[in-house]
Image (cartoon, helix red, strand yellow):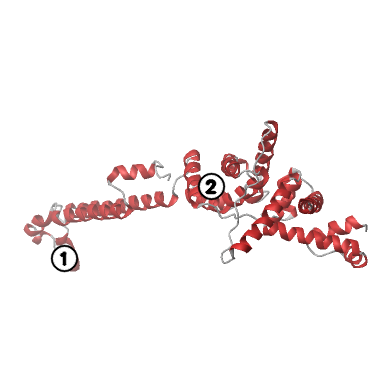
Amino acid sequence: MNHEEALKAAMAGGPLPVEARAHMSSCPTCAAELAALKSTEAALGAARPAAEGDPAWESRLIREISFARGFRRASRSTSARWLRIAASLLLAAALLTAWRGLRPDTNGQIVAGAAGVATSAQTRPALPDQTAPLWTDMGEDSTASLLQATESFTQKIQKEQGVEGAEGLDVLESGGWNG
Amino acid sequence: MQEAKDPWVIRLRARDADALEEMVRAYSGPLRRYLTGMVRNPSDGEELAQETLLRFLENLDSFRGESSVKTFLFRIAHNLALNRMTSAASQHEVFPGDLPEETKAGASPQRDYQREEAASAVRRALALLPPQQRSVVILRNWEDLTFKEIARVLSLAEGTAKAHYFFALRNLRRHMESSHEP
């Protein structure tokens, strides 16, 4: 192994090959050159500029690239999606409740709400006793209040999400959150 | 065709803004440092770092994950730097040697001054290296890339990257020594 090969091997990182080590221990010129190269390498490392940059510049980069390449916040869209699912479930529950309030009793008569329940209590003997309190609670009034509760729940979630009405949802879905 | 399985790349392809922010926070600083070291001009370094990220996103669909995101980014950055240096040379531009300094808290003003003087001497010497050698020493010393990664960035054999590094350090030392001579 000649001088240059030994020095290249020594500067290539990793464990020093046996031949190169043998050369270095028997050649003072190469040993001195290696020390000088290591010192240059250290000086270079000390002159390393900061990588952590300017947060304002990074934020500007994120904004400009998001805009240029059509990026949007996944977390916001996910929130909007869950909001819609929750609202749909509540609406379905309200409709189911309303349907149960109007379903025919065992004699084929329509039981319509609390008033119907009050006037036709004697026409529902076939129902098990434990269903009676539930049945009597499922009138028009309770359906209306469930719908109202659904609406207020939806509004509450929208308020928490910082979304104003249906228009806000459209903004979320159309990718308006680029910043 | 091999598909990139990196979850980060998948999220970037889905235009997930959180993934973009993570990428910018992770790589914009190192890219700017590398590019500024190459073109010797901080504002050009910033501009080229932005261009690198945009080009990366533009070519995301063709990224197959054969190399890492870091290597891919530095490869784009290197090509942009070479183009800029070629066009700057053709316009006879001379760039100042200013680079942002890494701050170290707790040092005395005198030590700061000495350290800054030494760093400036190294950077002046660095600017005198041929682009390929400059690139190798910056990627190795400032960006902590392995020789294998450097070889990928510069489209070289690994042995050639090691040889460039050796000659770069030798030239750097000579330039630094000659700058100390009266």
Residue A82 appears left or right of A127:
right
Depth check: A170 or B68 in front?
Answer: B68
Amino acid marked by disc 1 = Pro
Q: Please, which chain is the residue tagged with disc 1 on?
A: A
- Residue located at (52% from left, 48% from top): B20
Q: Identify the residue under disc 1.
A: A133
Farthest top residue? B91
Looking at the rendering, in which quadrant would you find the N terminus of chain A? bottom right
- Secondary element under disc 2, as helix, strand or loop, is helix
Q: Amino acid at mark 2?
A: Leu
Q: Residue at x 15, y 61 (%)?
A: A137
Protein chain holding label 2: B
Q: In this orientation, which residue lies closer to the viewer: B6 or B148? A: B148
Residue A156's image quarter?
A: bottom left
Tag nearer the camera, 1 or 2? 2
Q: Are marks 1 and 2 on the same chain?
A: no
| Residue B144 in sight here | no
Q: Which residue is mark 2?
A: B12
On the image, the x and y values in percent for residue A23 come to 91, 64
Q: Which structural element holds mark 1? A: helix
Q: Are marks 1 and 2 in contact (CB under 8 Å)?
A: no
- 10 Å neighbourhood of mark 2: few (<14), some, or many (≥20)? many
Q: Between marks 1 and 2, how big is the CA–CA gap?
A: 55 Å
The image shows residue B25 at horizontal and vertical percentages of 53, 53
